[in-house]
Each structure stands twice: as structure tokens, then as C-alpha cells.
Amino acid sequence: MSLRGIGIVLVLFVLGIAFSGFAAYSADTFQHKEEKAIDAEKLVAQNCASCHGKDLKGTETAPNLHEKGQKLSAETIAQIITDGVAPNMPPYAGGNLKDHAEISAVAQYITNLDK
Ligand code: HEC
């Protein structure tokens, strides 16, 4: 192979490494963003406020979540959200919360309402 040929191969090789490194890096940062993107405040506003009140201080039908957040642990609240409360509170807020990560973020948020 000529010196020039080797040069070209080398350049391509280095570019290949640089690109794969970049691809791995951007995939990594993207995933990271996805993980951190849970906006508990928004999820609560969208999924709990309709029954528990805009300020979450309860309505005629559903109890005050500020009080519940002081009395119950985040684990207990997460379990309540997962199971629902028959017959008036649907599990997973009616399927709008998609996984345990969202549920525990919401539960944590409820326990921190008055802190
Ligand atoms: C469709 C209406 C509705 C929605 C939506 C709803 N709840 Fe409820 N929730 C209720 C009702 C009604 C009760 C009271 C049930 C009972 O005591 O029989 C309740 C009870 C609770 C309790 C107390 C349970 C206990 O054993 O003390 C917690 C905590 C709670 N809800 C949290 C949430 C959270 C967090 C969300 C949003 C992810 C949510 N709820 C969404 C209607 C709802």
C-alpha cells in the first residue's frame, strides 16, 4: 500500500472512532435526560388534581393530599396509587401514570407538599 493509501485508511479509522464515541455519548446523554424528565408537579396536576382539588386540599369526594402526605410514607402512597382505592380512585390514576418511576416521583412529591 502506498503511503497515501495508509494515510487515508488512518484518517478514516480515526474518524470512525470519533464518530462512534460521539454516538455513544449522545445516546447516553439523551437517556439521561429521559430519566430525569419526570415532572412530578405536572403529573400531579394532570392526574390527581381533578379529584383531590386544584390545590390538592381535598374536595367533597376525595381527601386532602397535604394531610395524607404528612401522615403516610412515600412507599405507602406509591402503593395506594398503584392499587387505587376502590371504588372511587382508579389504579395508576386511570392508566395515565405509566410506570413505577412516575408513581414514586408523584408519591415523593405528595410527601413533600408542606415541606
Ligand atoms: C377519579 C378520582 C381520583 C383520582 C384521579 C385520584 N384520586 Fe386519590 N382518592 C380518590 C378518592 C375518592 C379517595 C378516597 C377513597 C376512600 O377513602 O374510599 C382517594 C384517596 C387517596 C389517598 C388516601 C388513601 C388512604 O388510604 O388514606 C391518597 C394518598 C390518594 N388518593 C392519592 C392520589 C394521588 C397521588 C393521585 C394522583 C396520582 C390520586 N389520588 C388520583 C379519588 C381520586
Image (spheres, rainbow, N blue to C red):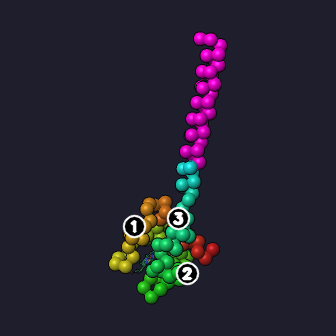
Q: Magenta region's main secondary structure?
A: helix
In this rendering, would 85 be left or right of 3? left
For disc 2, the marked residue is 55
Three-letter amino acid code at the position of disc 2: Asp
What whole-number distance in Å separates the C-alpha atoms at marks 3 and 1? 16 Å
Q: Which of 89 and 96 is in front in this view?
A: 96
Q: Quadrant of residue 114?
A: bottom right
Q: Residue 13: x, y in percent?
A: 60, 25
In this rendering, would 102 be left or right of 10? left
Residue located farthest toward the bottom when viewing the structure as drawn: 60
Q: Residue 93: x, y in percent?
A: 42, 71
Residue located farthest toward the left when viewing the structure as drawn: 87
Residue at 60% across / 21% down in the picture? Answer: 9
Residue located farthest toward the top when viewing the structure as drawn: 1
Question: What's the mark number on residue 40?
Answer: none
| Residue 18 part of the magenta segment | yes
For disc 1, the marked residue is 95
Q: Nearer the viewer, residue 44 or 11?
A: 11
Residue at 54% across / 67% down in the picture? Answer: 40
| Location of the C terminus (image quadrant) | bottom right
Three-letter amino acid code at the position of disc 1: Gly
Label 1 residue SS: helix
Q: Is mark 1 within 8 Å of ligand 1?
A: no
Q: Residue 52: x, y in percent?
A: 48, 80
Three-letter amino acid code at the position of disc 3: Ala
For disc 3, the marked residue is 105
Q: Is residue 108 in sight in this rendering?
A: no
The 10 Å Cα crowd at callout 1, few under 14, some 14 to 19, many 20 or more, is few
